[in-house]
Amino acid sequence: PEGDIYIVGYTQSAVINWGGALMTKITEEGEDQNDDAGTAFQMGKVSSSTSEYQFFAVKLSTSEDAVMPWCMESCSLQENVAHPIIKGDTCLIDNVCYDSGATAELFGRPCLVCNPGLTQTEWSFGPTVG
């Protein structure tokens, strides 16, 4: 097929499992997620269902040329799984590049930072709380 491919739908699940280790947590903007500063989901400690239906739209394929994120040096394919090689002093979190020291303040989590010394693919707790 040519062109863009989307999946749209609704679910009562708070987590969508796409296969393998790929999961998406559905959150409602402005609502307290009560998940320990955003790390409970990473640790598998989040409720998997909600009392409301959640709408989702996912773009699976595009007709546009692929563009590698600026913080990636390359990408290797091992057993049909992509493994990014991320440049030093940067993070690639949820497919978005961040410089070392950048915080998750935009997501309401100012205590979480990009700390490439600990991990380049997840937010880390910063040196200060509050």
Image: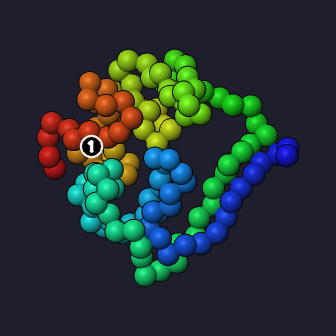
Left or right, 122 with reference to 118: right
Residue in view at x 23 percent, y 58 percent: 36
The x and y percentages for residue 87 are 43, 19
Query: x, y (%) of residue 53?
Result: 52, 78
Quadrant in which residue 44 is drawn: bottom left
Residue lying at 38% horizontally and 48% vertically, measured from the top left: 106
Looking at this view, name the residue that lies furthest to the front. 79
Question: Where in the figure is residue 6, as x and y percent of width and height?
Answer: 71, 55
Residue 107 vertical position relative to residue 51 in the rendered view, above or below: above
Please name the residue that numbered disc 1 is placed on. 112
Q: Is residue 88 above or below residue 116?
A: above
In depth, the one of 116 and 99 nearer the eye is 116
| Secondary structure of the residue carrying numbered label 1 | strand
Q: Residues within 10 Å of mark 1 (few under 14, many from 20)?
A: many
Quadrant of the image occupied by residue 18? bottom right
Is residue 15 placed above or below 37 in the rendered structure? Answer: below
Query: Visible in this render: residue 103?
Result: no
Relative vertical location of residue 31 with respect to residue 127 in this rendering, above or below: below
Coordinates of residue 12 in the picture (x, y in percent): 50, 75
Task: Report whether residue 68 is seen.
Answer: yes
For badge 1, the amino acid type reads: Leu
In the image, 66: left or right of 53? right
Tell me which residue sits at (39%, 68%) in the image.
48
* Name of the residue lying farthest toward the bottom: 51
